[in-house]
Image (cartoon, rainbow, N blue to C red):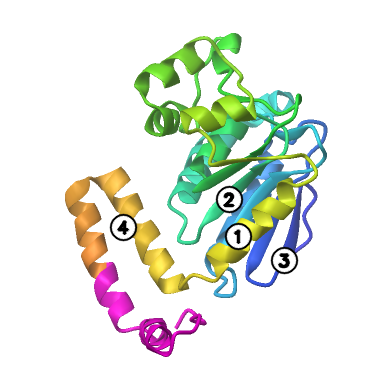
Amino acid sequence: MAYENLVLDKKDHIRIVTIDHPPANAWNLATMDEFEHVVNELENDRDTRVVIITGAGEKCFSAGFDISDAANSPKTDPKGRELWRRIDRFPKPVIAAINGYALGGGCELAMSCHFRIMVDAPNAMIGLTELNLGIIPGWGGTQRLTRLVGRAKALDMILFSKKIGALEALEMGLVNKVSTPEGLMDDTLDFAERLAERPPIAVGCVLKAMAAGAYEGLDQGLKAEAEGAGIVGQSADCIEGFTAFMEKRKPVFKGE
């Protein structure tokens, strides 16, 4: 399928989703519909082990909701909440390569990803700035920012609509790694390649268990963990892992 507002690339078991909706890679209903199709495709693609999400150009990862499409907000808003939730609970690792501004819904999307690598550049700022418009973060921002940086810091950022740079974001735990503009995608791909080498079934079980714990509570998280332990114990990857250990070689996991 051809997309107007997204670009899909593939490198081995890694899929790269680039938001390409100039000038600010903002989310209108059409872009959201395309993203929903991509999420469905990648979730069901066995060959995809890791997903990278980034923005086109050098200025914006995503500036959030496209206010020029405000007439469609009754449809876009609930879809954004549900899709960002699906990314947060995605069965494969998702990495945000934050190449520029990540504001509002763009910041919320980045926080939904399992990992965030952010460029250290003057035009790269991240934050939830909705209160400047008299509204609040509505695609999970109040919950996910609190989960990542703590209540006091999250309140400070949200209530004062603060935008912060990569180094401050790294210090407070909002991003996992900082990169240079010229090295961002290389660093992200290197990280993704190392993730793609991990046993896919086991990775999926870890993500499922952690998501269950976060959304449904400790008991459900422990239940999902126990179920995952039973699943991986019967996998060919488990046999390969133990065999490689005994043979003192690097395992080659096939997701079987």
Callout 1: SS: helix
* Quarter of the picture holding the C terminus: bottom left
- The earlier-in-sequence mark between 4 and 3 is 3
Q: Distance between the residues labelled 2 and 3?
A: 14 Å
**Which residues fall within the magenta stretch?**
228-256
Which amino acid lies under the numbered mark 2 shown in the image of this protein? Ile
- The earlier-in-sequence mark between 2 and 3 is 3
- Classed neighbour count for the residue bearing mark 3: other residues with Cα under 10 Å, few (<14), some (14–19), many (≥20): few
* Residue under label 3: 10
* Residue under label 2: 95
Q: Do the residues labelled 4 and 2 touch (CB within 8 Å)?
A: no
Can residue 75 be spotted in the picture? no
Q: Distance between the residues labelled 4 and 2?
A: 19 Å
Q: Distance between the residues labelled 4 and 3?
A: 28 Å
Q: Distance between the residues labelled 2 and 1?
A: 8 Å
* Quarter of the picture holding the N terminus: bottom right
Which amino acid lies under the numbered mark 4 shown in the image of this protein? Ala
Left/right placement of residue 224 relative to residue 99 reads left
Q: Are marks 2 and 1 in contact (CB under 8 Å)?
A: yes
Callout 4: SS: helix
Which one is in front, 249 or 58?
A: 249
Which one is in front, 134 or 148?
A: 148
Residue 232 is situated, as x and y percent measured from the top left of the image, at: 33, 76
